[in-house]
Amino acid sequence: MMTKELLKEIEQSMKKSIESTKRELSELRSGRANPKMVEGLRINYYGTPTLLKELATIGVPEARMVVISPYDPTSLKEIEKSILQSELGITPVTDGKIIRLIVPPLSEERRQELIKIVRKVTEEGKVSVRTVRRDAKDKIKSLEKDKQISEDERFKSEDELQKMTDRYIKEIDTILTDKEKELKEF
């Protein structure tokens, strides 16, 4: 019973590693417009840092354009300022009511840089999953040492742990492949 609860905790930690990797990759700008590029930006809204997705609707009317429609037109200048200060590298075009972001196509050099970054981020994700596995393995061994589980239970738990780790590492590899493909496409 104790190891099942531990394995559930471990799985949650591994899922968090995957989510973190996905979130980091979604913020990388490929040649395609994507609302995730900007929705995490923090806007100084009346002195409070607020997420852009809470202040505006974000749409993608075409493959290379993001349209931001603020709920409060007075926040337009602050949104524009945050976009300019971000690492997006896109200059916003505003007409007083909405902001348009035209996503330029990527140069071959920039694609290669982004692919290196994607590989680094996914490798960090794998390291994170492996760290969770290592810590879990130590916990399982200490449970056996404290006579809370049997040797058989330890072997069974470690086997389950390895299968879980392999599954999440494979998921990260799939994320890497998909992101590389997306970067090469556009």
Image (tube, rainbow, N blue to C red):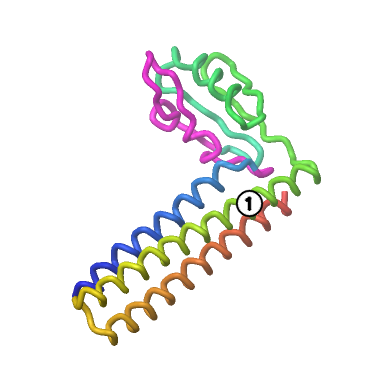
Residue 70, image quadrant: top left
Work out whether residue 179 or residue 153 is closer to the camera in this orientation and state it.
153
Q: Is 45 in the magenta? A: yes
**x, y percent for residue 150:** 24, 84
Could you tell whether 42 is left or right of 140 in the image? Answer: right
For the magenta stretch, what is the residue range? 30-59
Q: Position of residue 102 (x, y in %)?
A: 66, 31
Q: Which residue is mark 1?
A: 118
Residue drawn at 45 percent across, 61 percent down: 131
Residue 29 covered by magenta stretch: no
> Which image quadrant for residue 139?
bottom left
Residue for point 43% across, 18% down: 44
Asked if 34 appears above or below 172 in the picture, the reply is above
Disc 1 marks a residue whose amino acid type is Val
Q: Residue furthest bottom?
A: 152
For the N terminus, the image quarter is: bottom left
